[in-house]
Image (cartoon, rainbow, N blue to C red):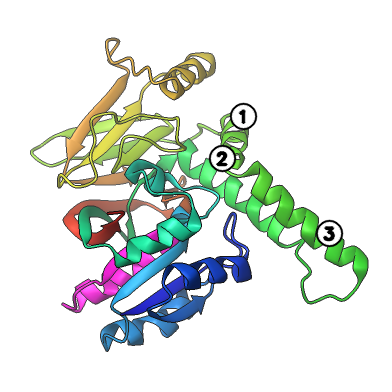
Amino acid sequence: MKIGVVLNPHSGRIQVESLKTQIQEALYRCEIKYYLTEHKEQLESLLLPDLIHQKINTLLICGGDGTINLCLQTLMKLRESHIAIPEIAIIPSGTANDLASELKLNSNFKMAARAALSEKIKKIDVIEVQADNKKQYMLTNGGVGIAALTAEYANQFKTSLKKTNFCNDPSEIKQLLGQIGQKTLKQVGHHIYSMAFMYSIGSWCPKNWKIQIDMGNENQLITTSPYILINNQPRMGKSFEPAPHTRHNDGTFNLWISEMKKVRESFSNIMDIRKGILNTNHGLNKSFEIQNCTIQSLNPSRKINFFGDGEILFKDILTTNIKIHKQTLPLLMPS
């Protein structure tokens, strides 16, 4: 069996050589080819030709939601060219591992790697996000407003820590700074998003924020809410559960909007949802299970950013179209 292994060397808990050793031990009978990169264009140029010419039977992705999303963009190009997407296995080793958590994947690297040999397949839905004549894809949760701002702040913080990694500088002090940066990132982990969320609430500017959402069948909604989420699974960030009835293989996604106006009221609502309490009786938490929608800024001076899987997929757009591709990605599950 020929297995391609995607490794993002700067992802979460990854220590490249140690992880390679565990993969080799778990898949010792397989022919393994590694793809080490954190850049979309480089990964695509390395991986896509091998996938097209079927030099890889299975793709093993090592990292978190961001690394999986990086691979997803390349995999969906295969589908657009009517080429079958290979079976995927995941080693959850990132800062955020929401997909792996929802799928209950093994956090032991060696055991997770052995899923590449499994015959148990689960196909999950892929959400397509289109804007400015470009397509991006996501698997877990996304949206606009404060959630997108949170993703942006979190990624800026992670990037600043990674920049302290002076691996190519021989000086002792810079080597030490690099080790501290990497250690801090690993220890803070998914708590980065909680800190970024708190900062986003305080820095959010409501001026000119007015959003129109069209869901088809003449179902239209206009809102000034900064809390607008697109969910392909119930949870994000392990504890935040805005869409408890949503599944990632049913051919629909969830649109969730909180219409609460006061900061204190909104914050209390978010904290309740983190505790698993979703109050819909007051009508201010709105939830829709749909197959497509359009999100549009009604003020050209206030453009929107759209995030998905913890990454900013589009910046400074006025309109985005969202739709679902049912059971498109074949995931290998532990036997």
Mark closest to the chain's N terminus, 1 or 3 = 3
Q: Disc 1 versus disc 3: distance between alpha carbons?
A: 30 Å
Residue 260: image location, x then y, percent = 41, 19
Q: Let me know if residue 302 is in the magenta part.
A: no
**Mark 2 surroundings within 10 Å by alpha-carbon count, few (fewer than 14), some (14 through 19), many (20 or more):** many
**Among all residues in the image, which is located at the extreme left?**
217
The label number, if any, that marks residue 333 in the structure image: none
Q: Residue at x 56, y 40 (%)?
A: 193
The label number, if any, that marks residue 193 in the structure image: 2
Residue labelled with disc 1: 202
> Can you tell which quarter of the image residue 171 is in?
bottom right
Callout 2–callout 1 Cβ contact below 8 Å: no
Q: Toward the viewer: 277 or 101?
A: 101
Q: Is residue 85 left or right of residue 22?
A: left
- Quarter of the figure that contains the C terminus: bottom left
Camera-side mark, 2 or 1: 2
Q: Disc 2 versus disc 1: distance between alpha carbons?
A: 14 Å
Identity, as a three-letter code, of the amino acid under mark 1: Gly
Specify start and end residues of the magenta stretch as a single range. Answer: 67-90
Mark closest to the chain's N terminus, 2 or 1 = 2
- Quarter of the figure that contains the N terminus: bottom left
Camera-side mark, 3 or 2: 3
